[in-house]
Image (spheres, rainbow, N blue to C red):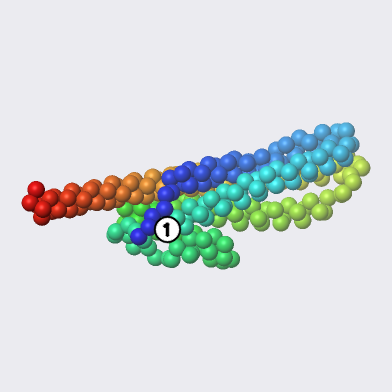
Amino acid sequence: MPTYPVQGLGTAAAIAVGVASLLYLPSGLFPVLGVRIARTAAERLDRDLLLGAAIAEVLLTLVYGLAILAAAVLVIIWTWRVRKNLEAFPGALPTLSPAWAIAGWLAPFANVVVPARVVANVARDSLWRRSTPALVGVWWTSWLVFHFGDRILALVEDQRYSRLTEWPRSETEFATYVRYYQEALDARLIPTVACLVAGASFIVLVRRISTAQQDRIAKATQAHETSVSSEIRDGGRSALAGTGT
């Protein structure tokens, strides 16, 4: 059965996940800066500052979106490769087909369960574990908390922001922006922490699984080359014996 190299791809996926996790921080914790900007705007009655804060938050979210998209592509390819390699490993017991390593991330509803099952299966058979490593549960739980928490908060914050006065004029109207960012900060702490935990735990999983599979592939390659060399030597000796040399 063919095998696929995963060490380099795993490193690239781990770096991409780490970068995306760190880039979420400026977006997730933007209300810290938003409170200061809103207070300054209230003191000066400067609506342009509030507009600048809104534009800055959109740009930070856009940068994070591009980073998570790049990370997602690398992670999906890595997941497919490590799952495909199981078919070449004696003793491995893969459950879901390699197609689910891709479709599981993309299919609605299935993406809540399938990626965790695929990675759990890969972790068991790559690391020679009878049970699923606890780190898989930590990663997937924190990812779900972050994924759904961030989406729900985005919807709630959009509704709250739409109720603010578009062009505030009085101190009272400016003060509503201060309260908006203060309340947003408290709510965003949970998905922000969950994002960091999910990113860190997945990076560790990717590194461990990639290293274990690459070592196994290397040993199998060495064994195959040794076997071929032995066959060549034995064949040469047989040929010499047949000629009476």
Q: Residue 57: x, y in percent?
A: 74, 43
Secondary structure of the residue carrying tag 1 is helix
Residue shown at 43%/45% (left/top)? 7
Q: In the drawing, does residue 128 fall left or right of residue 17?
A: left
Residue shown at 53%/42% (left/top)? 15
Q: Residue 200: x, y in percent?
A: 50, 43
Residue shown at 31%/49% (left/top)? 221
Looking at the image, the residue that sits furthest to the left is: 244
In this view, the residue in front, 227 or 63, is 227
Q: Is residue 175 visible?
A: no
Q: Quadrant of the N terminus?
A: bottom left
Name the residue that disc number 1 marks. Answer: 83
Q: Residue 237: x, y in percent?
A: 13, 50
Q: Residue 133: x, y in percent?
A: 38, 52
Tell me the quarter of the picture where residue 25 sits: top right
Q: Which kind of residue does numbered mark 1 sit on? A: Arg
Q: Is residue 155 visible?
A: yes
In this view, the residue in front, 53 or 37, is 53
Residue shown at 48%/64% (left/top)? 100
In this view, the residue in front, 151 or 45, is 151
Q: In the drawing, does residue 158 fall left or right of residue 145?
A: right
> Vertically, is 168 above or below 159?
above
Q: How many marks?
A: 1
Q: 10 Å neighbourhood of mark 1: few (<14), some, or many (≥20)?
A: many
Q: In the drawing, does residue 93 fall left or right of residue 58?
A: left
Tell me the quarter of the picture where residue 33 sits: top right
